Image (tube, rainbow, N blue to C red):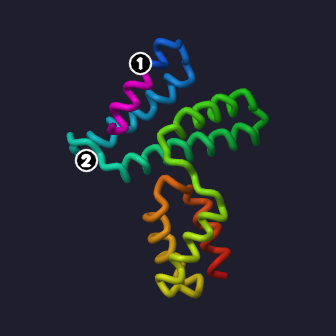
Amino acid sequence: MALEQEVMQKMKEAMKAKDSVALASLRSIKNEILKAKTATSNKEDMDETEELKLVQRLVKQRKDSADVYLEQNRKDLADVELAEVEVIEQFLPVQLSEEEVDKEVKAIIQESGASTMKDMGKVMGMASQKLVGKADGKTISKIVKDNLS
């Protein structure tokens, strides 16, 4: 099932359950899907990679906002953002552990012949493409740096 149909189904369930946090989260996903469709004038469904990137971006935005709220001692607002993260993450595949990402990155480094930090861009591009939706960019970047330095 495409992301848009799945989100619509979950929205109906959230409305029936009167779950305002889930409903707000799902509406934000639907809103981003509509923006993506109109931005590219692509009336077709997005492919799975684009959908995963969209959902990952929404999760990252919420986590970043929660971090800012926590720095400003606004735990109440951070809790709302983190609750939305939990709802949105349902649409992502199971996230890989750092050890699994490290294993994948090492394989990519060996495959590409990278050896120095100058090769980081090439490795990051390959890793980001291979691990889309399975790991966030910050984790991938940290592991690539650790393996190349």
Q: Residue furthest right?
A: 73
Which mark is drawn over residue 12?
A: 1
Mark 1 or mark 2: name the one nearer the start of the chain.
Answer: 1
Q: Is residue 80 above or below residue 66?
A: above
Q: Which label sits in the foreground, 1 or 2? A: 1
Q: x, y percentage for residue 141?
A: 59, 67
Tag 1 and tag 2, C-beta contact below 8 Å = no
Q: Residue at x 45, y 32 (%)?
A: 28
Q: Residue at x 33, y 37 (%)?
A: 1
Q: x, y percentage for residue 24?
A: 50, 25
Q: Secondary structure at mark 1?
A: helix
The majority secondary structure of the magenta stretch comes to: helix
- Residue 11 lies in the magenta stretch: yes
Q: Amino acid at mark 2?
A: Thr
Q: Foreground residue, 74 or 63?
A: 63
Q: Secondary structure at mark 2?
A: loop
Q: Residue at x 75, y 31 (%)?
A: 75
Q: Quadrant of the C terminus?
A: bottom right
**Disc 2: which residue:** 40
Q: Residue at x 32, y 35 (%)?
A: 34
Q: x, y percentage for residue 3?
A: 37, 38
Within 10 Å of the Cα at label 2, are there few (<14), some (14-19), or many (20+) other Cα atoms? few
| Magenta-tinted stretch | 1-12
Q: Amino acid at mark 1?
A: Lys
Position of residue 98 in the picture relative to residue 137 (left or right): right
- Residue 88 lies in the magenta stretch: no
Q: Is residue 63 above or below residue 80?
A: below
Between the residue at mark 1 and the residue at mark 2, the CA separation in whole angstroms equals 27 Å
Q: Foreground residue, 94 or 132?
A: 94
Position of residue 4 in the picture relative to residue 128 (left or right): left
Q: x, y percentage for residue 131?
A: 49, 61
